[in-house]
Amino acid sequence: MLLATFSWLYTQITERSRARLSQIRPEDDVVQQMLDDAAEFFLGEDFSIGLDLLAAADRDPELREGIQRTAKENRFVVEDMWVGVLMSRGLSRGDAEDLLWLIFNSMRGLAVRSLWQQDKERFEHVKALTLEIAKERYARMKR
């Protein structure tokens, strides 16, 4: 039952990301869109629920493996789609993956930090800083 719930949850999350990706136009700020997608996932309720389910599965190796597999299957699809968008904008695969890792890991780090500290102002500052750095890197990578 837990695995089915987790699978349903991550399918919904993946579909939201797919919808966002399908609506990106050539003139859109792809870095902002990627940050928004990462923040929605990592800083939203769904990721927190996923962490809770993963912690609950700690004593059940089969459940834990199923949760990890489901998360990888869904999130890697989204990550690959973002890399594809960045490559279509002129980035190499390596540069696209670097940019994705920068943004996604920054948002994931904030999500983990939120487990023991709630500081909305600081989190927004770090999100803005991540966006600034990512946009600078993106501009350099496109040359």
Image (spheres, rainbow, N blue to C red):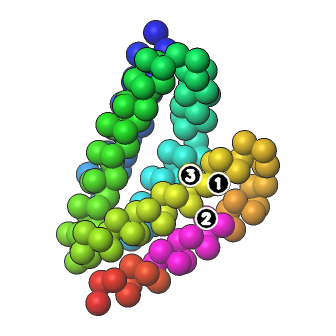
Q: Residue at x 48, y 53 (%)?
A: 38
Label 1: element kind: helix
Query: Could you say which disc has been placed on residue 127 in the image?
Result: 2
Q: Earlier in the sequence, mark 2 or mark 1?
A: 1
| Residue 20 % position (x, y) | 35, 50
| Amino acid under disc 2 | Lys
Q: On screen, 28 above or below 72?
A: below
Q: Looking at the image, do the residues carrying marks 2 and 3 touch, with CB atoms under 8 Å apart?
A: no
For mark 3, what is the residue?
A: 108
Callout 2: helix, strand or loop? Answer: helix
* Magenta stretch holds residue 117: no
Q: Residue 98, can we see it?
A: yes
Task: Name the quadrant containing residue 52.
Answer: top right
> What amino acid type is highlighted by mark number 1?
Leu
Amino acid on which the number 3 mark rests in the picture: Arg
Mark 2 and mark 1 residues within 8 Å of each other at the beta carbon? yes
Q: Secondary structure at mark 3?
A: helix
Please report the bounds of the magenta region as a residue range. Answer: 126-135
Asked whether the beta carbons under mark 1 and mark 3 sit within 8 Å of each other, the answer is: yes
Instruction: State the CA–CA distance, disc 1 to disc 3.
Output: 5 Å
- Residue 126's disc number: none
Separation of residues labelled 2 and 3 (CA atoms): 11 Å
Sequence-wise first label, 2 or 3: 3
Q: Residues within 10 Å of mark 2 (few under 14, many from 20)?
A: some
In this rendering, is residue 66 above or below 112?
Answer: above
**Residue 127 versus residue 37 in the image, above or below:** below
